[in-house]
Structures are given as C-alpha cells and as structure tokens.
Amino acid sequence: MGWSKRHWKEVMAAIYSDLAGKVVLVTGGASGIGEAIVRRFAQQKSVVVFFDIKVEEGTRLARELSDQGLSACFLNVDLTDIAALRAGVADARKAHGPISVLVNNAAHDERHPTEEMTPEYWDDRIAVNLKHQFFAAQAVLPDMKAANAGAIINFGSVSWMVGQGGMAAYTASKSGVLGLTRSLARDYGPYNIRVNAIAPGWIMTERQVTKWLTPEGVEELMHRQCLKRKLVPDEIAKFTVFLASEEASACTAQHYVVDGGWV
C-alpha cells in the first residue's frame, strides 16, 4: 500500500546522521511493518536492501523509493530456504558492501488449531517465524565483527505474553526470539554488536485489518490497551530506526514491548 508524497512528508520524524550510508538489511520488507521500516531507513539515507517473496509489492516499493532519490533494493528471497537466504545476503554484500544493520522482521501469524497440527506444519511455522532469524544473523555477523560495530533487531510478538491461543507454533517461535536475542547479544557484545528484540502489539497492517480485525476484537483491545487508539506500522518503524542508531548505543540484550500498553 503506497504512500503519497504528501503523507510521507507529514510523518517525517527524527534523522539519525550515523545511519546515512549504512547498509541495512530488512527481511519481510515488502508490506506491513516491514514496508514501514524500509521507508524509515530510506528516509535516513541508509542503503536499504529488503527481502520478501511478494514480488509485485517489493518491486513497486523499491521503484517508488528510488524515484524519490532514496536507496532501496528489493531481492526476491524465500527465507525458509536457508541456501537462498545466504545467497541473498551475499548478493546484497557484493552489490552494496558490508551489512551494518539487520532487521529480522519477517513472520507469518497464520492461525493453526492444535488438533490439526502435523510435524511438517510445525516445522514450517518454526522456519517461517524463527529459524531464518538465526541464519540471517549468522550470515551478517562476519561483516559486523570486521567493523567492530553493528545492530541486529529481531522481531518478536506480544502474543505469547498476553496468552493468545490458536497458534501454538507461532507463539512458541516468538517467545524463542527472546532467547535467541539474549544469546547473540552475549556472544557478540565484545565486538560492539548490539542485539535487541521488539515485540509489537496489535499493529493495524493491511493484513491484520483484512483477516483478523473484528468489532469485538477492537473493543477488547481498547479495554486492555492503555492508549485508546489503534497503532500503525510506522510507530514500530520509528522505534526500530532508533534502536539501530547510535542514540541507542548502550542498548543490547533487551526486549522492547511496543504495544500501546496492552501487556
């Protein structure tokens, strides 16, 4: 869903000069929260490379940003194919240079009744929501070690914190993001690499509005959430950019809940 130039100007926020020229890799960047993140890093004058399997959306977003004089490169990468993921990182590095920031945003919150779960589908959900985060980090860590600097931002979810049911593999994956984050932060802190996690609340992406939003759901959310309004993708994107910047230079091994006070 494209933004008009007028709307883009209206939502411009802080500029972090240290992000200019840095190569930023965003997974799942063609739509939803990922699209907002790509836009925000492009605004920072970063060199943004984003992976997705949504070819039409990804191509359109990259073209739109390029037409605005911003740097955005879309690569069609299936993150569940680890060989393809590694190849995508290698292509990004060859074309643009070492990766300075990794945003592990890609995920898929499809519901799956426990009674119908198969081992194959369980493995698929883990691959879609957790496994690729580790292997994307593994692929970019040599760049960050060589630079003695870097930021990795993994995306979790409040779903497991609020006790959401109906998607056990998803909530298991998202809770696992916290353990992954803290382990990587411990191992790579000596190289000045910061690793943090963001747990978004219910963010009103086009997918959420189309598939899951109901009047009853909104009523419950407004009852539980401290901020009595719907949250939008750009609110997550702005915090993501902050965490990647030197303004957050002492922040690592942390799990930041950005949910309007739902949890």
Image: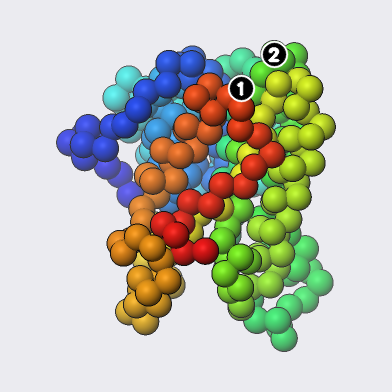
User: What residue sits 65% from the left and 23% below the top?
Assistant: 150
218 to 240, vertically: above or below:
below
**Is 115 left or right of 106, judged from the image as shown?**
right
* Most foreground residue, 183 or 86: 183
When asked about the image quadrant of residue 172, the answer is bottom right
* Most foreground residue, 55 or 116: 116
User: What residue sits 44% from the left and 46% below the top?
Assistant: 236
User: What residue sits 35% from the left and 71% below the top?
Assistant: 222
Res. 213 in view: no
Name of the residue lying farthest toward the bottom = 115
When asked about the image quadrant of residue 117, the answer is bottom right
Disc 1 marks a residue whose amino acid type is Ser
Disc 2 marks a residue whose amino acid type is Ala
187 to 236, vertically: above or below:
above
Q: Secondary structure at mark 1?
A: loop
* Most foreground residue, 88 or 206: 206
- How far is mark 1 from mark 2, CA to CA? 8 Å
Name of the residue lying farthest toward the left = 6
258 to 162, vertically: above or below:
above
Q: Which residue is mark 2?
A: 147
Residue 146: % across, % down: 75, 14
Residue 6: % across, % down: 17, 36
**Is 217 left or right of 111, judged from the image as shown?**
left
Please give the count of numbered marks on the rendered protein.
2
Residue 261: % across, % down: 44, 59
Res. 261 in view: yes
Q: Secondary structure at mark 2?
A: helix
Residue 240: % across, % down: 49, 38
Q: Which residue is mark 1?
A: 100
User: Of callouts 1 and 2, which one flags the residue occurring earlier in the amino acid sequence?
Assistant: 1
Label 1–label 2 contact, CB within 8 A: yes
**Is 29 left or right of 107, judged from the image as shown?**
left
